[in-house]
Amino acid sequence: MDFELKTLGLPAAAGEKCDALVMLVPDAFKPGKDVLSRLAGDAVKARDLDTKAGKLLQAYRSTGVAAPRLVLAGCGDASGRKVHTAVVAAMGALRTSGAKRLVICMPEGAKDDAVRAAVLATAESSYVYVATKSKPEGRELRRVVIGVSDAAPRKVAFAAATAAANGIEFARELGNLPPNHATPTRLGEEAKKLAKAHGMQCEVLGPKEVAKLGMGSFMAVAQGSEEPLRFIVLKHMGGSPGDAPVVLVGKGITFDSGGISIKPAQDMDEMKFDMGGAASVLGTFRAIGELKPAVNVIGIIASCENMPSGRSMKPGDIVRSMSGQTIEILNTDAEGRLILCDALTYAERFKPRAVVDIATLTGACVVALGAVRSGLFSSDDALAQALSQAGDAAMDPCWRMPLDDEYGDGLKSNFADVANVAGRAGGAVTAAKFLHRFTAAYPWAHLDIAGTAWKSGGAKGSTGRPVGLLFQYLLDQQSTAPAKSAKAAKPTGKSVGKPAKRK
């Protein structure tokens, strides 16, 4: 889909040749003498249109309006969140219209957040998965014009929003692919294509290379599957050569059966979404490639399947991670942390300013936060604050969770340095504490996206989250990149950042 930002007042908008016109009407709307203003003003006066965000009034072939379909959409105070609600509602009304060209008239004086919201809401609402359908129908909308009173001040926000929208769609498409298509090999191929298209560097390692690195924990998860593992490293070096990079680490379990600790059959098909962290890293790099921010970013993806077979890891097995720490496998369905811990150790070699891992890690986080906010855990207050602010700005929110050392006590093992699960209580926190053990060399944050990476039920599908949050965070780092890498304080307390748990 192509987006265009255009200086477009209401009088000119009435004459725009398009299939549908959406006019956002705020609480403070003051009608002028043009056709659209009169229509909206009369509708508000007659109480046929409520300016509350999401309320609509539709018209067809209105006199003086070139577009055959007109949607007047209330947008409340015209803030980003209200505009997002309004555009989603309007797009819902136009879903079956067959419109190919759409014009959205923003309220007078719309700010950056409103423009960003309009772009993201349009892209979100018009996305249709067709990759594996025999009749790929439903993607009619091709061009969207965002009309504002003055385009010049909004160009930067618009460019960032369109890049983010493309990155989110890329992540959604990968996430929605069936597991026999979106294999670890396919993820490696997609990473190489991204790198080639956008001038990035990419390296894809297979089982032999991973074995040489000593990633015993990662290999233990992969050994039960016929699909070979892939360890993907993407690099965008847009900052100064001396700037320490931000490292994004994505969990890429392309299908999670639970292994020997097998999951219930019901809804197991949704475990194709267990590579949501990997998809979000690739989606973020898709957005980076379009906007090319002045920051050094490295993406790391550990990808494999978790399958039951005669070669699978078993409860009671002990594996040695790349860090040298030994891990007792108590539950093979707690596999995400087992691949991430080796990726987090690998990240040390880049002397990063910060490392953020993204994973559909625990059902416990879904219980705690539902599908609204991703769980945020961090060893660094400044990093946590920056991610939280980026999430709010991108309308992709997260919520900081505790990381007290006492939560790590449940991961004690009589036979290894650490167990891979603790008890049921505080499962999202204990999983984060397990990862914390492997992050002493840098500021670190963990995003548990088990509740936000996909939707179930009638709206089943990938959401592309948290690409918006990650991309906004990277844009915010352009002016704050330090010349040298930051060193995190070592985790304190007798648990040394222990414990774990999983969905």
Image (cartoon, rainbow, N blue to C red):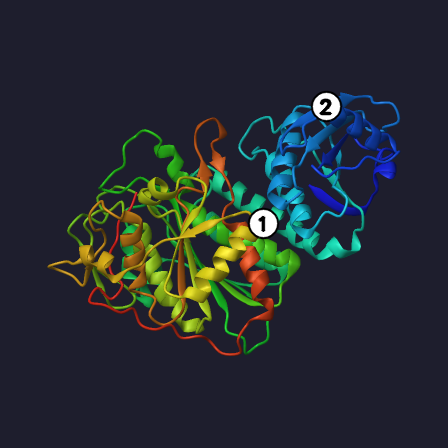
Label 1 element class: helix
Q: Amino acid at mark 2?
A: Gln
- What residue is disc 2 on? 58
Q: Residue furthest left?
A: 414
- Residue 236, given in percent of the width and then of the height, sits at 56, 65
Q: Residue at x 56, y 46 (%)?
A: 168
- Say whether residue 64 is left or right of residue 261: right
Question: In the figure, residue 438 lies in which quadrant?
Answer: bottom left
Q: In this orientation, which residue lies closer to the viewer: 494 or 237?
A: 494
Of the image marks 1 and 2, the number of the one nearer the N terminus: 2
Q: In this orientation, which residue lies closer to the viewer: 41 or 353?
A: 41
Q: Amino acid at mark 1?
A: Gly
Question: In the figure, residue 122 lies in which quadrant?
Answer: top right
- What residue is disc 1 on? 167
- Using the image, tell me which numbered label, if any, was put on residue 364: none
- Circle 2 residues within 10 Å: few <14, some 14–19, many ≥20: some
- Residue 52, given in percent of the width and then of the height, sits at 64, 32
**In this rendering, does residue 96 appear at all?**
yes
